[in-house]
Image (cartoon, rainbow, N blue to C red):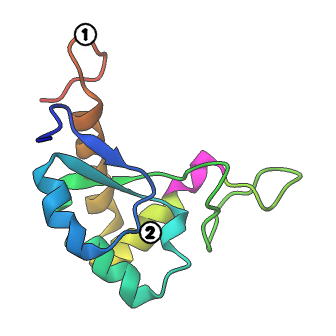
Amino acid sequence: MGHFPSGVILHSFNGAPEVVPQLTKLGSYFSFSGHLMPLQEDEARKIVKAVPLDRILLETDSPDALPTNPIYFVPGNATLNQPANVRSILIYVASLLEMGEEELAEISYKNAVRVFSFKGSKITSK
């Protein structure tokens, strides 16, 4: 139907790299979570590298998608994910992109501000 005016977030994206260009043209953002980690590393790298940097978001998908290298566990249940594990996602995706964690954190933050900003919001995109 056309471009999404405010953007759309593809939650826990681990789809085919071939679809990324067309989805980007439609205004999509691609959010990576722990669901990316069970894939073969070469496959995960192809997916992540297909996404333009200005469209990358990071998430945990808590309480699901526990990363393969969690930093934090939910007390009493080591199978549940928690939001603090977004750092694990950051570390993994940065390694796939061969970039520094701080650089990716800044990119993802700016992208999140852009997609979640709206008139009247306390978060503004500048």
> Number of callouts in the render?
2
Q: Which residues are magenta?
A: 82-86
| Left or right of 126 on screen, residue 35 | right
Residue 69's image quarter? bottom right
Q: Secondary structure at mark 2?
A: helix
| Kind of residue at disc 2 | Ile
Residue farthest front in this picture: 1
Residue farthest right in this picture: 76
Residue 84 drawn in magenta = yes
Q: Residue at x 74, y 57 (%)?
A: 73
Q: Residue at x 26, y 61 (%)?
A: 103
Instruction: Work out whether residue 123 or residue 80 is closer to the camera in this orientation and state it.
Output: 80
Vertical comparison of 70 with 112: above or below: below
Residue 32's image quarter? bottom left
Pointer 2 residue: 91
Quadrant containing the N terminus is: top left
> CA gap, disc 2 to disc 1?
33 Å
Residue 109's image quarter? top left
Q: Residue at x 44, y 72 (%)?
A: 92
Residue 116, position in %: x, y?
30, 31
Residue 53 appears in the figure: yes
Residue 120 is tagged as 1
Residue 72, position in %: x, y?
68, 57
| Left or right of 53 on screen, residue 30 | right
Quadrant containing the C terminus is: top left
Instruction: Work out whether residue 118 or residue 86 is closer to the camera in this orientation and state it.
Output: 118
Residue 24, position in %: x, y?
16, 55
Q: Secondary structure at mark 1?
A: loop
